[in-house]
Structures are given as structure tokens and as C-alpha cells.
Amino acid sequence: MKKWLISAVLLLIVGALAVFLSSNPLGRLVKLAIEEFGPKMTQAEVSVGAVNISATDGEGSIAQLKLGNPKGFKTPHALKADRIALSLEPSSLAKDVVLIRSIALNGPHISYEKNSNGLSNFDVILRNVEQYLGVSGKDKSRDENSGDQKKMIIESLSIRNAKVSYSGLLDVDLDLPDIELRDIGKKSGGVDASHLAQAILSELNAQMLKTLTKSLSDGVNAVTQSVGAAADSAKKSFKGLIGK
């Protein structure tokens, strides 16, 4: 009876492993890695719907990526992307450094929010990633958390047609200028996922702040011009009333 039970358990394990290996194992491993390391790095919810990557030609995609917000923010997410297109070099998967030809986000929705301390959600997420890496404060050389992560070189990373909803003194919706980063990790011999996240978040944060500052400045100028025009019109009307 015991031998039969052991055999049955082994058969179930082998069967489960066979199903796993035959149904996009690379995509499943990437999904597990994202959902395991993402929350640790960002201190926010990170989830994906599915990851599909062909081990034959290296083409694939990540569906329904969601980056939540850290504590202290009200919007339901920091970033949502329905689909991220991926292309990598399959032969590099067995090497120390994986070559990723391209990562492309098209049309993600971003929520940019300020808390009571004047920090944005992306300020806090970026700070959490830096703390995870051990680069904050005095000890900027420590990198214990990311030592076991696979390294990558990314030839092209693009974010296009991003929509930003800003919640702060004013609530505005903005179109973010397209972002394109090239040859990430090429000079250093590869970057791990933590440093890649840091690079992407830094660029996003900088572009959003720049775009928001310009938008608010344009808005203030438009209001000033409108008030000035209204004042001139009122002055002319008043002069007309008193016959001057």
C-alpha cells in the first residue's frame, strides 16, 4: 500500500512538472520572478496577468502589468499596462548575461500623485528600490539584495503614448512624451532587474515632473493672460461709460 502511494505521488509530481515544462515554462518563471521580486523592491503590489515568451525565437509579451502604490497614496495604481512586447535572444538564456533586443510599452496609464509631505508616489517607489539595492545613505556600494539576479543587456526600451493622471493641487490629465532608452547595461556588462527598475523609474519620474511643471506653467500663463485681457476689456468698458 505504501509503495503504491509513493508511486502515485511521484507520478503526480512528474505529471505536474511535464505540464509546467510544456506550457511556456520561461513565461511562467518570468511571471513568478516579477511577482516575487517586484513587491520587495517597490514596497507596492506588483502583478501580471500572463507572460508568454517563445524559447524558439525569443518573441513574447507581458499582459496586464500593474504596479500599485506604496502606503500613503490614494490612487489604485501607479502604473498599468495592458501589454508589454518583448524580444530577446534565445541563445543568451544559457549565458551569464541575457540579451534583450527590445522592451516596448505602448499606451500605459500612469497615476502621479503627491502625498501630504510633497513626495510623489514615484519618488517613494524609487526611494524604496534604492533602499532595496542598498544605494541610499552612506553605504552606496552595498548590493547584497540583487546579487543573485540574472543580468541583462537591453538594446531598446521604449514607453510610448503614455497617459498620466496627476492628483495634487490640481487634477490634470497629461500626455507623456515618448521615452526611449538604449543599450542599458552594455557598458557595465549587464544590469539585474533591480537596477533596470531603478533606471526606468528614474527616467519616468524625471519626464513626468518635467511635463507636469511645463503644463502647470502653461496653465498659469494662460490664466494670467486671460485675467489681463479681462482687465483690459473692463478698463475700456469703464472708460466708455464715463465718456473717455
Image (cartoon, rainbow, N blue to C red):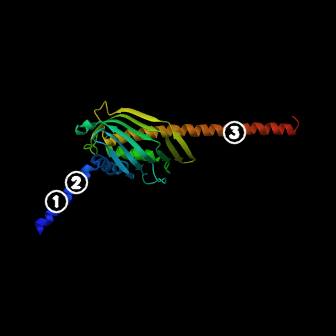
Mark number displayed over residue 32 = none
- Badge 3: how crowded within 10 Å, few (<14), some, or many (20+)? few
**Disc with the residue nearer the chain's start (2 vs 1):** 1
Give the percent coordinates (x, y) of residue 130. Answer: 36, 43
Q: Are marks 3 and 2 in contact (CB under 8 Å)?
A: no
Residue topped by disc 1:
10
Q: Amino acid at mark 2?
A: Leu
How far apart in space, not on screen, are marks 3 and 1 (Cα)?
A: 77 Å
Q: Position of residue 147 (x, y in %)?
A: 25, 43
Q: Which residue is at the far bottom? A: 1
Q: Position of residue 200 (x, y in %)?
A: 40, 39
Residue 119 visible in the picture: no
- Disc 2 and disc 1: Cα gap in Å? 10 Å
Residue at (56% x, 45% y) in the render? 172
Task: Inspect this view and state whether residue 157 appears.
Answer: yes
Image quarter in which the N terminus is found: bottom left
Q: Secondary structure at mark 3?
A: helix
First in sequence: mark 3 or mark 2? Answer: 2
Seen as rendered, the residue at the extreme right is 243
Which type of secondary structure does the marked residue at label 2 adopt?
helix
Residue 17 bears which disc, if any?
A: 2
Picture quadrant of residue 5: bottom left
x%, y% of residue 231?
75, 39
Find numbered disc 1 in the image and state the secondary structure of the residue it sits on.
Answer: helix
Whether 217 is drawn above or below 50: the answer is: above
- The residue that mark 3 highlights is 226
Decide if residue 62 is on the left or right side of residue 162.
left
Q: Amino acid at mark 1?
A: Leu
* Amino acid residing under circle 3: Ser
